[in-house]
Each structure stands twice: as C-alpha cells, then as structure tokens.
Amino acid sequence: MGSFGFASNFSFYFAHHMSTIEGGVVCTNDDKFYQLMRSFRSHGMLRECTDESFKKTVTESYAFLNKDFIFLAPAYNFRSTEINAVLGLSQIKTLDSNNEIRKDNFNYFISKLNKDKYITDLNLEGQCNYAFIVILRDANFDKRNNLETILRDNGIEFRRGCSGGGNQTLQPYMKSFSINQKELPNINHIHNFSWYIGNYPQLEREKIDKLLELLNNA
C-alpha cells in the first residue's frame, strides 16, 4: 500500500495504525510533485523545496521578489515537529506486530457477529482495520436508534457511517453537484445503518466479547 499510483497519503491521527498525534504523510515517486508538496506544507514557500534547479528557475522568473519569501500557491502550515517525528518513528518497531493483533481482533469479531442481524460476508483479504465494521442487514431506523442507545449507555464510542461518516455526496461541499441519491443505495445504507467501533492492539478479548454480546442481543 502506498507504493503504486501517482501519490498516496496516510493519516497519523492518534487512533490510527501509527500516530504522531496529528498529521500524516504524502508518498510519491514524482520529483516535481514532491517539491511542490514540500512547499505546500509550509505556506507555499519556495524555500522549502530542495531542488536547486527548480528554485533557480522560479527565482529568476521573479527576480523582483525576496527569494526567501516567494509563495508558489496559497497554502497552510502543515509542517510536523520533531516531537511528532519522535513519536512516529518510535512506533515503527511495533507496527507489524500491532497490525497482526488488529487483524486477529477483527477476524475474531466478525466471526462471532450475528450473521442474521449484520452483514458479515466481507472480503477480509489483506485487512488490517483500526475499527470493527458493523452493518445492519435491515434498513430499520428503530433498530438503528435502539442499537446506538445501547452502545452509548454502555460507554462504547462509535462513528456512524464507517470511515468518513458515510455518503460524502450529502456533505455541504458537494452541494454544487447534481447527484441522484436513488443511484447510490449501497452507500446510503452504509450512511444510515453502519458503524465504526475502535480496534486497537491493547484491546482485551473480554471487551470484544462484551461488545459482541451487546450487538448480538440488541
């Protein structure tokens, strides 16, 4: 993952496979894009680039500007810190073993989940999820609301809609696009009747069993 395509990105949010508390990384094998990304992470400043030939071409084109303050594009400050880097690097040693635990947790969870109530026939090849996926079979809002009440009453944090909160075409930033929601039955089912529940290496099997008991008896 991350070794094919023009570019890829990984989040290092604290609940993910490895963390720097906040932040992430962009991977690419395109030299120009790499230079631009170095700039974009730091207010769009040219001085963040490491390609001296590229920098020279730009500075010569904008000789009337201070070369230390040439902004290639509108951008923000996405620079990480040394402390973030130390936290991230320290976790690489245990990343593979922790991922194996996540995989084992997920496989155990999905194998014990009630197949009559929830969709469990998922393609698990290569999975290493930082959350358990729960998808109701029935598009039933009463069942959904009852399940969420049970989870909240038992102090179990969840995210409805799985990763990203479900159907992104319903979000405000998509309002300028004309989208027929009737053509998106699967994602709308996920949007309304699915959840993410945290899966992490230190999660005890007893807690997974308790979660399963609540879900299967809901």
Image: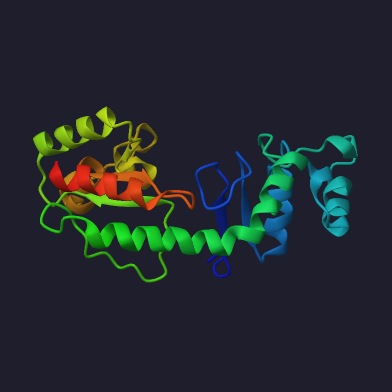
Whether residue 84 is visible, yes or no, is: yes
- Its colouring scheme is rainbow
Whether residue 81 is visible, yes or no, is: no
Which picture quadrant has residue 43? top right
| Image spot of residue 203 (x, y percent) | 43, 48
Q: Quarter of the image containing the C terminus?
A: top left
Q: Report the front residue among 43 and 98.
A: 98
Q: Residue at x 34, y 67 (%)?
A: 124
- Position of residue 115 relative to residue 145, above or below, is below
Which picture quadrant has residue 8? bottom right
- Position of residue 121 relative to residue 208, above or below, is below
**Left or right relative to 217: residue 123:** right
Q: Residue at x 87, y 59 (%)?
A: 53
Number of marks: 0
Q: Report the front residue among 9 and 42.
A: 9
| Image spot of residue 10 (x, y percent) | 56, 53
- Position of residue 199 relative to residue 121, above or below, is above
| Image spot of residue 70 (x, y percent) | 81, 38
| Image spot of residue 189 (x, y percent) | 19, 47
**Left or right relative to 186: residue 128:** right
Q: Report the front residue among 140 and 203.
A: 203
**Left or right relative to 155: residue 99:** right
Q: Residue at x 66, y 66 (%)?
A: 29
Q: Report the front residue among 66 and 197.
A: 197
